[in-house]
Amino acid sequence: MRKSRLGMALLPLVLLLLSGCYESQSMLLDPSAARQPVQGGDWTETRDGDSYHDRMIARSDGWYDFYEQDVTSNGDWEHHVVLLNALGSSRGFATYAYGTWDDDEKAYVYGIAVILSDGSWHTVQPNCDDTSGEPVEKGVALQQGATLIKDGSPQGGDVCEFDNTGSLLAALNAYAQTDDFWNRLNQPS
């Protein structure tokens, strides 16, 4: 998954729901440790030639409601409930683990959000799909105890499945320390 960037310090959780990611069958982040480093807001951005309206709202329970509409195709608003937990820091920047339910995958999916020095947010969703090589994040996940679930389809879609919080957070934190993570974080949207 590629990162997104917003100059107004909003958490862009667009493109969350790609196959090949870190997944689990139950929520492995801790709702009692929810973090809301921004209150939310509305923005519009263009990705791959399509325009999207995005809206993020901080909820009283510590989670976020994230809404997105594909303006180009006049699509319906999609809704995701997202939880953030503090992950630590990488290269001097605060990092957060995020998690949300993916209805297509029928699993919780996870990624990493970073606040950069200009106040902008960037997100990366680790990818375990090896159709284009051997992803670093796949190796990190397997070292931390994830199970590789092979999709077998020509499009790939293999996922790294976690069954406990400790191994998920260890994998996310370890991946956030790699050059591969920072290279993906700094690629243009």
Image (cartoon, rainbow, N blue to C red):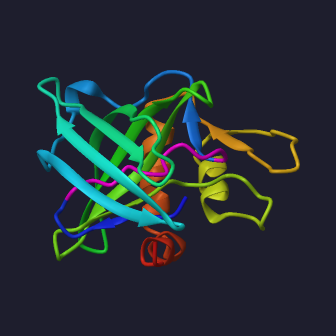
- Residue drawn at x 62%, y 40% is 145
Q: Which residue occupies the foreground of this view, 10 or 46?
A: 46
- Residue drawn at x 54%, y 67% is 48
**42 relative to 161 in the view: left or right:** left
Please tell me whether residue 39 belongs to the stretch shown in magenta: no
Picture coordinates of residue 86, whole percent (x, y): 25, 46
Please tell me whether residue 17 belongs to the stretch shown in magenta: yes
Picture coordinates of residue 171, whole percent (x, y): 51, 50
Q: Which residue occupies the foreground of this view, 52 or 106?
A: 52
Toward which corner of the image does residue 177 lie, by quadrant?
bottom left
Picture coordinates of residue 67, whole percent (x, y): 33, 38
Quadrant including the N terminus:
bottom right
- Residue drawn at x 48%, y 78% is 187
Toward which corner of the image does residue 66 lie, by quadrant?
top left
State whether the magenta stretch is mostly helix, strand or loop: loop
Q: Which residues are magenta?
A: 10-20
